[in-house]
Image (cartoon, rainbow, N blue to C red):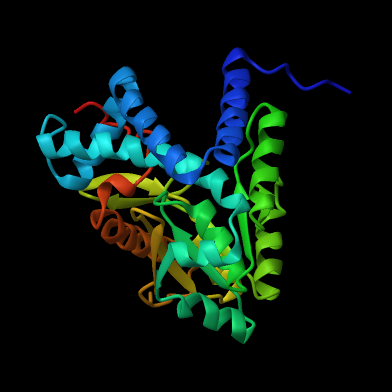
Amino acid sequence: MSQAASPSPRERIAYRAFATVGWLGRTLPTHTGRMLFRWAGSLAYHVAPRVRSIVAANQAMVLGRSVEDPLVQAATKEAFRRYARYWFDAFDVVDWSDDRIDAAFVWNGIEHLADPVAAGTGVIAVLPHMGNWDAAGRAMLQRGLPVVSVAERLRPDELFRLFLEHRQALGMTIIGLDQDGRVGRALTTALGESRVVALVADRDLTGRGVEVEMFGGRRKLPAGPALLALSSDAPIVVASIYETPTGWRCVLHPLEEVPRTGSRREDATAITREIARAFERAISASPPDWHLFQPGWSDRVGT
């Protein structure tokens, strides 16, 4: 039986960084930690030119301006700060009381999750990488809305275990994407148990996603949420999470109804493209809250 490959230096650094951020998030007072991490985000903006160019290209697409535009530069810098705060908050909220996490969230449309769960159908929540989905999962659980989600396999294995332990500490059930053939069945089972299946769906990790148009450019989104909805008949709700000075605001609304043609492929494509339009509206409302630090449009980086 072959042994797993030893972690690379980059993977060891990633593990140490995650463990260190987790320790700081559980140790520093909230106000101090947020100030420190926002400062670290500003520092990263200045010392990481390659990542800065990627984020600036993404922000430029959203804002419809050139990467040199002052508004794009300001949004890019703020995106670094908010992403840094995301990492601190994700660990900080683990030990928050139910009352504190409830007070930190402003909900618009929470009934769109609560009603299907109460009715026994379950619900699929789709969201872009915005705000803080870790904190949102913790807050949903506090409101009696159990969350199931998926995660890509991380290396080294120690890093993946840390990640799983963190999400489990927040009360979420996580299914690894490497469970070939079992992810769809596990999510369908979760819906049958009247849970919230939360899927961060603004990046296609497989290369087999649906081509959509977002902000005037072509990119791919995963087909998984649409296929799950078609197989389960569970409703899709779009979740947009925005940072506030002391917490977050989560806006929820049902996905616009898409007429069914009877063709699974065509219906999945149409639903995914409707998700893309909903994501456009969500991101446009606060571009720096979009934590997309990978190329969003492969031919647009640095342009």
Give residue 159's position: percent from left, percent from top.
66, 31
Give residue 208's position: percent from left, percent from top.
49, 45
Q: Residue furthest top?
A: 9
Give residue 161's position: percent from left, percent from top.
71, 37
Q: How many marks?
A: 0
Front-lying residue, 218 or 71: 71
Q: Residue at x 38, y 55 (%)?
A: 246
In the rendered image, which quarter is residue 69 located in? top left
In the rendered structure, the answer to whether residue 184 lies left or right of residue 293 reads right
The relative height of residue 174 versus residue 34 in the rendered view (above or below) is: below
In the rendered image, which quarter is residue 256 located in? bottom left
In the rendered structure, the answer to whether residue 259 lies left or right of residue 64 reads right
Q: Residue at x 49, y 54 (%)?
A: 133
In the rendered structure, the answer to whether residue 26 lies left or right of residue 250 reads right
The relative height of residue 171 versus residue 44 in the rendered view (above or below) is: below
Quadrant of image for the C terminus: top left
Task: Answer whether residue 296 is visible to the viewer in this image.
Answer: no
Q: Residue furthest bottom?
A: 119
Task: Answer whether residue 292 is visible to the viewer in this image.
Answer: yes
In the rendered image, which quarter is residue 120 located in? bottom right
Front-lying residue, 68 or 233: 68
Q: Residue at x 60, y 79 (%)?
A: 117
Q: Residue at x 28, y 52 (%)?
A: 213
Quadrant of image for the N terminus: top right
Give residue 199's position: percent from left, percent from top.
52, 57
Front-lying residue, 31 or 14: 31
